[in-house]
Image: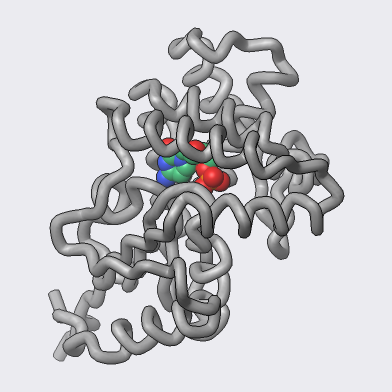
Amino acid sequence: MKTTRPFIPTPVITIDGPTASGKGTVATLVAAHLGFHLLDSGALYRLAALASIRYAIAQDDADALAKLIDDLHITFREGLAQLDGADVSAEIRAEEVGNRASVIAAHPSVRAALVARQRAFRKPPGLVADGRDMGTVIFPDAVLKVFLTASVEARATRRHKQLIQKGFSANMDDLLRDLRERDARDSNRAAAPLKPAADARLLDTSALSIDQAVDQVAQWYRALPAPKVH
Ligand code: DC
């Protein structure tokens, strides 16, 4: 008798939230804890932004940006982001690149050009995906959706620390202004705005340590009912 293996979809945990909410760090640690793959979708937008600077594509030229993304040669290896074979992991973390990523991310054609690349990260045994629209648009069937928040002051303080550690210069007033502008742009755009999915669990990390945030997500995941077999 022929037996067919039941189909259990590869589980995805989405962690969305505003810039510097800690979602990148939390997602990385949750993925390591569960042995899951990791998608840092912001890095894809940052790579596209960096490429647009390098190839002098205007940030308002939606069609040329989408074409650029289709042709981009991007790889992630052992946590390193490569563009055309060169490591650009440090370069894409610059505030200038992040701000440009936020601007080009408002074009629906840019978002559409990145959908398949993001979904390709879904591989057994599971994926933790962080970004802005992971739970709402890219992985609407995620088994667990988390929306991380933190006050703008807590986020600016974290970003300041991160930038100094990475050897960039940083000024708190500029950071607060940039974060507020970026939040407004990411939240108010028509295409896939930053907002919690209807079925997302909210986690305010303003007063939580990284470990406490990771523990909460892991606990939510462990408490899920057994996966449905299709
Ligand atoms: O998470 P991040 O700061 O690295 O993201 C940089 C920008 O990319 C962010 O300001 C908005 C955009 N982005 C997006 O629109 N959708 C995502 N899923 C991830 C990032």
Left or right relative to 101: residue 145: left
Q: Is residue 74 visible?
A: yes
Q: Position of residue 60 (x, y in %)?
A: 49, 10
Q: Quadrant of residue 83?
A: top right
Left or right relative to 164: residue 13: left
Q: Residue furthest front?
A: 173
Q: Quadrant of residue 227?
A: bottom left
- In the rendered view, tell whether residue 33 sits above or below residue 161: below
Q: How many marks?
A: 0
- In the rendered view, tell whether residue 86 sits above or below residue 70: below
Q: Tell me which residue sits at (48%, 62%) in the image.
A: 23
User: What is the quadrant of the N terminus in the image?
Assistant: bottom left
User: What is the quadrant of the C terminus in the image?
Assistant: bottom left
Q: Position of residue 150 (x, y in %)?
A: 42, 60
Q: Tell me which residue sits at (43%, 56%) in the image.
A: 151
Q: Tell me which residue sits at (25%, 90%) in the image.
A: 223
Q: Tell me which residue sits at (27%, 71%) in the image.
A: 144
- In the rendered view, tell whether residue 134 sits above or below residue 114: below
Q: Position of residue 103 (x, y in %)?
A: 49, 24
Left or right relative to 88: residue 116: left
| Residue closest to the eye, 158 or 192 | 158
Q: Is residue 40 visible?
A: no
Q: Position of residue 109 (x, y in %)?
A: 38, 21
Q: Quadrant of residue 10?
A: bottom left
| Color style of the picture | one colour
